[in-house]
Image (cartoon, rainbow, N blue to C red):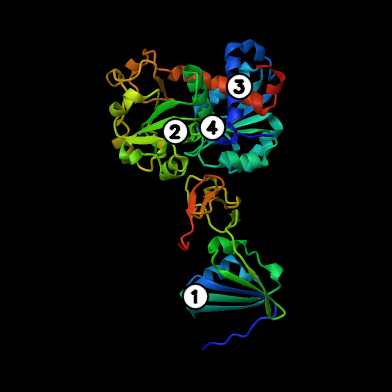
Amino acid sequence: MRHLMSPLDFSVSEIDRLLDLANDIEKQPKKYAHACEGKKIATCFYEPSTRTRLSFEAAMLNLGGSVLGFSSANSSSAAKGESVSDTIRIISCYADICAMRHPKEGAPLVASEKSKIPVINAGDGGHQHPTQTLTDLLTIRSLKGRLDNITIGLCGDLKFGRTVHSLINALIRYDNVKFVLISPEELRVPDYIREDVLKANDIEFEEVETLEEAMPELDVLYMTRVQKERFFNEEDYIRLKDFYILNKQKLAEAKEDMLILHPLPRVNEIAVEVDDDPRACYFKQAQYGVYVRMALILTLLELDKEFDY
Amino acid sequence: MLNISGIHEGFVLDHIQAGMSMRIYHDLKLDELDCTVAIIKNAKSSKMGKKDIIKVECPIESLDLDILGFIDHNITVNVIKHDKIVEKMELRLPKHVKNVIKCKNPRCITSIEQELDHIFILADSAKEVYRCKYCEEKYINPNRRR
């Protein structure tokens, strides 16, 4: 039995296979409409995340399965003080697979150690959010046709943004990927990403402070939200949240076929006027999120073997 | 000159950095052993200037020395049997350590679930970097000798 805690749990060839399956689901959704009949996913969300939870639930429903779960710690037995280990032992009796979101880092790993069913980390604090990374990889590969030979700009909160850290870790495994890290000094990537990931693997990258100077060379621009819940004090949050806003004017310097991605929800870092630009792919990205979660559920339940793709 | 007699069976831990012996005493849980322990602090050393030494009279299988490698793998471990040194053990950084250090990341699951073990896994042996198994918080040994 396999779990998914980090995007690096899968090898490059396993990720390729997963993305192939997701693309096949996109092309032929009816083929998979009954793949999970009789199966249940438990969405155990100890903190609110409507988008990720609904994406998992939509994925399971699209596969003909059903869903159960909770959407905040208050509505679960955690409010009575039950440990994650005990909760997953119980959930294992009710469902066939579990997607867990928890504000504390490592909670899904604790669950996976006691679980009798596959556990998917649906986000643990500022640590990992592997299904977002798989979504990002599927979006880039589907719309660009490749994951190698790209220059990707990562903009906004690169210090606390776990989606950015996971995406960097996942993309360095492909050839000739260059990173342009666009952030204010206060929100630069942590040292371990710069030293242990980028420099240690001899990856080309540069750190810049403005969107404008990075824009012309980018194949992909990945925008992120400055998340209030990642800050210890509100003063820092208010000071930094409006730092980098993408609008039509800044886009004028971008390549015609650049992709604009965003893990969503956005606050104001992408102006609404950008939504109609053909380069804006963040809503498509949400759709790819459902396909990749469908592919992941099938893979972890070992039902992928029943299909040719 | 302080004289402490030799031991029949056990360990002599030599070349401990001066001042570290009490930490080792606690981390090796020597206080829980019913045996003779001698702690020598600030002994003269040609190599180190000053050093600490611990002598433990106990059956050799009763100590888990992995933890010593984590604290300082430059410590010399002499294994004594029948009043003689029978082995000089080489210490290595253990692949993981359990409940020796606590994860200080307030966002880590170990900060709220008290029954969880605090496990750190060796991430970079050259830099002596360990990371929390759960949240990957970094720990660098503050006693590392360069």
Rendered residue at 66%/20% (across/down)? A65
Residue sitting farthest toward the bottom: B1
Could you tell whether B33 is left or right of A107 in the image? right
Q: CA distance from mark 1 to mark 2?
A: 47 Å
Proximity of marks 4 and 2: CB atoms separated by less than 8 Å: no
Image coords of residue A180 (percent x, y) = 37, 32
- Amino acid on which disc 4 is placed: Pro
- Depth check, mark 1 against mark 3: the one in front is 1
Secondary-structure class at tag 2: helix
Q: Which residue is mark 4?
A: A130
Q: Which residue is mark 3?
A: A294
Q: Quadrant of residue A307?
A: top right
Q: CA distance from mark 4 to mark 3?
A: 14 Å
Could you tell whether A250 is left or right of A14 in the image? left
Secondary-structure class at tag 1: strand
Q: Which residue is mark 2?
A: A164
Q: CA distance from mark 2 to mark 3?
A: 23 Å
- Depth check, mark 2 against mark 3: the one in front is 2
- Amino acid on which disc 3 is placed: Met
Proximity of marks 1 and 2: CB atoms separated by less than 8 Å: no
B80 shown above or below A128: below
Image coords of residue B37 (percent x, y) = 61, 77
Q: Earlier in the sequence, mark 4 or mark 3?
A: 4
Q: Is residue A97 visible?
A: yes
Chain ID, mark 2: A
- Depth check, mark 4 against mark 1: the one in front is 1
Secondary-structure class at tag 3: helix
